[in-house]
Amino acid sequence: MSFNQNVRSDSLTLLDILLPKPGINQNSTDLIPALISITQTSLLNEPPISMEYLQLISACSHQYPDLVIDRDIYSKGLSDKHQSPEYDTTSNTSKTQKISGFFEEHAMIIELPRDRVVDVMTPDKAGHTPLSYASKKGHVEIVKKLLENGADVASITEKGWAPLSLASDKGHVEVVKVLLNKGADLTTQIDSGHTPLALASYNGHIEVVKMLLEQHADVAALTNDGWTPLTMASEKGHVEVVEMLLDRLADVEAIGKDGWTSLCLASVYGHVEVVKLLLEKGADITAQTSKGRTPLSLASEKGHIRVVKLLLEV
């Protein structure tokens, strides 16, 4: 969707990045974090933004600044120093086009209601809110500011992703901590049935797993295919995650899709240390998949000699 289709015909809302202090190189990391305030200006009544101002925003955006949103909205619009010296009151179309290309590529656009209250909960077409995006990218300061301004910690996308799920999946420890402190639901599931713990376990995010377990996340929660956090961590060979889950009494014999157990998965992928942990917890070496494959036959086929030795020693 084009920029023009995303805004009202008579107004444009921009994230207004404050100019750096004199002497600061606008291409340097001295601009991080850039302080953001939200302003509203009229396409019909206000001058367009100068190219110098756009270049500054571009420099900041390329340095990936931390964005801190100020709920107080300017009533005046953009200051004179941001206005183009070539302002033409008769050329509203060219103004729109000039601004359009830049913001489609480089900036967030937030349309404010007439009462100037910032809506931090409006989702995009896929159901992602500003909090969703900030959580996924690990921008903890933005997450904090959005939550302070009323963002819904329980918002979900069309595919069931909550902010906690997104942060857990990517291993953003500090974001997870903030969301948990705001009461984020540990049991939330995405469309495939994965909980935040399942996502963190699959991806080997040790600190996130530890944090979720401390909050009593369910180690027995199943995905739509019957996988548990333990079976997924075993498949990927995440030793420390497997150890933590076993310490929380995760079911070592849980059976997933097509009859695969944690030991079968660890054996077929040759994860020696995981196999050791599972055997110490009494994992069944005679377990069979739906095709009759045992951990020993799976490890033998793949040539995992150390796993084979472990299984034969039981």
Image (cartoon, rainbow, N blue to C red):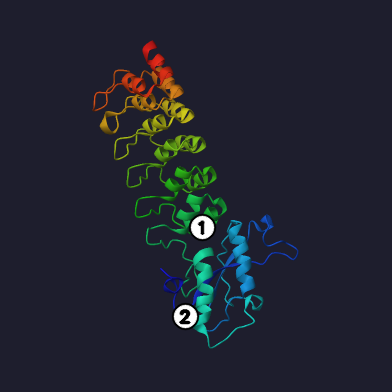
The x and y percentages for residue 126 are: 37, 58
Would residue 82 be found to the left or right of residue 170 on screen?
A: right
Compare marks 2 and 1 and give the one earlier in the sequence: 2
Residue 89 appears in the picture as rendered? yes
Q: Nearer the viewer, residue 193 or 64?
A: 64
Q: Residue at x 29, y 38 (%)?
A: 225
The x and y percentages for residue 100 are: 50, 72
Q: CA distance from mark 2 to mark 1?
A: 27 Å
Q: Nearer the viewer, residue 48 or 171?
A: 48
The x and y percentages for residue 247 are: 44, 25
Residue 184 appears in the picture as rendered? no
Q: Is residue 288 above or below residue 141?
A: above
Q: Residue at x 62, y 78 (%)?
A: 83
Q: Secondary structure at mark 2?
A: loop
Using a 10 Å C-alpha cutoff, classify the residue at mark 2 as few (fewer than 14 neighbours), some (14 to 19) or many (20 or more).
few
Q: Residue at x 72, y 64 (%)?
A: 21
Please state which amino acid type lies under the numbered disc 1: Leu
Label ID, residue 10: 2
Q: Is residue 21 above or below residue 214?
A: below
Q: Is residue 245 above or below residue 305?
A: below
Q: Work out which residue is located at the far right of the displayed protein and give it.
A: 23
Would residue 82 be found to the left or right of residue 114 on screen?
A: right
Label ID, residue 146: 1
Using a 10 Å C-alpha cutoff, classify the residue at mark 1 as few (fewer than 14 neighbours), some (14 to 19) or many (20 or more).
many
Please state which amino acid type lies under the numbered disc 2: Asp
